[in-house]
Amino acid sequence: MRFIITVLLIGSSCFGFSQTEDLSNVLRFDEYLGFVKKFHPIVKQAELVIDESQAKLMKSRGAFDPKVEVDYDRKKFKNTEYFDRLNGTFKIPSWFGVELKATFEENTGDFLNPQAFVPEDGLYSAGIAVPLAQGLLINNRMASLKQAKLFREQAKADRDIYVNNILFEASLVYFKWLQAYTELKLFENILVNAEQRFRGVQKGVEVGENAEIDETEARIAVNNRKLGLEQSKVKLMKTALELSNFLWLENNMPVELQPDIIPDVNTEPIVVATFNVNQLRDDEVVLDEHPKMMSLGYKLEGLEVDTRLKANRLLPRIDVEYNFLSQTPEVARTFNTAEYKGGVNLSFPLFLRKERGDLKLARLKMQDTEFEMDATRVNLQNKINALKQELESYVAQNEITSQMVSDYERMLQAEERKFQLGESSLFLVNSRESKLIDGQLKAIEIQNKFFSTKAKLFNSLAVNPDL
């Protein structure tokens, strides 16, 4: 009886390598994405967009802050006091372009303008300035504040897109790392099988039960498996270094993945739970709630505010101001209509070419954004539908490759039994084994594409998961 029979009885059992690893050195997919989301610099950079929007909002609100102005002017020459003028103003801007104002004026000197003469204790006034046309319903202050609020909401949507993109890129690298590790374990196991077969053939040659050419063929198979193993080691090393680009700790400290850290080979349930893929596939997607569409929506609202502001500038500028005057402000009845200072300012460009040009440009920007929203909506819908169908295809492909690998294993086992009975050759056994290896590599590749497609669906919906 041939010595190789004992070796061949091991058969394809070696290919079903154990997936039970020491959990202490396993980097789970959700843990990995948690590190990326919490510590990666790009994610922190995305948070700066929110901080920037808050700063712009605070800046725009500053236009409504009360303001104190003091104007002091004095001239003295050759012992002559030409004038000594003090003018203090307190202004309170309001939402609708109306401005409340209180002033104190005190002027002395030998060469004062007659209109600057005021009582010895100074002159007080309290009044209001109102734009009757341009600037009443909308003005620069109002527009800036509205746009800053919209920019803040737009920044939140953009932040979700940035974070989703970095998680998507990190996911693809993890899946490549997982694929390289799975291929490495496959080649390690098939090398063990090939070496055992080679030793069995060697013993068969020594006792004359095998031809020397069988030993040569077995050695070729061993070297071929060794070559595949070395290539898989290089691939694993490269993907591990690529994965390290996404691993950071606090204080912006990069982390290098240690050689003993391995991926979770049973990661599919975790991927499904992390991406929430099943729900994303089953639920009808509401595109209006998509972060990209929301971002464009806020951008369009901001352009609408700018368009209303430009349209308002087509109106004439009519500013009316009225101030009550009093030299005894502590007595309320001294503020009356008999003593006042008021005025009207009117201005209106004759051709309005600048204003009409600005309004046309603003409307063109709105149209451009509307076109972008329409195109984005269609692209997103088609992309999501295509990815859903692609996922369904990969589910079927996984089942097909699983059946193929099972059939290849049966064919290899049958060829081994025929070889044991002397009805086959080592060449045919190695050929069956190579087919099985190709089938398993194909299954690993399809699993990687399956995970990558889930990540693409996750990315197309711009989901920002809690990790």
Image: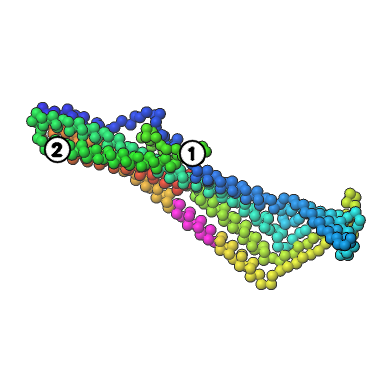
- Residue density around tag 1, few if under 14, some if 14–19, many if 20 or more, within 10 Å: few
- Residue density around tag 2, few if under 14, some if 14–19, many if 20 or more, within 10 Å: some
Residue lying furthest right in this view? 120
Residue wearing tag 1: 253
Is residue 427 among the parts visible in the rendering? yes
Tell me where residue 417 sits by quadrant: top left
Tell me where residue 304 sits by quadrant: bottom right
Q: In the structure shown, which secondary structural element does the residue marked by tag 1 occupy? A: strand
User: Where residue 378 appears, x then y in whole percent?
Assistant: 46, 55
Amino acid tagged 1: Met
Tell me the residue at 24%/32% (across/down): 192
User: Where residue 457 appears, x then y in whole percent?
Assistant: 42, 46
Reply above or below: 317 against 393: below
Q: In the structure shown, which secondary structural element does the residue marked by tag 2 occupy? A: helix
Q: Quadrant of the N terminus?
A: top left
User: Where residue 128 appears, x then y in whole percent?
Assistant: 79, 56
Relative to 332, is 213 on the left or the right?
A: left
User: Where residue 216 appears, x then y in whole percent?
Assistant: 14, 38
Is residue 424 among the parts visible in the rendering? no
**Segment tinted magenta in the rendering:** 367-381
Residue lying furthest bottom in this view? 351
Relative to 10, is 243 on the left or the right?
A: right
Tell me where residue 186 sits by quadrant: top left
Residue wearing tag 2: 216
Front residue (pair 300, 220):
220
Amino acid tagged 2: Thr
Q: Is residue 375 magenta?
A: yes
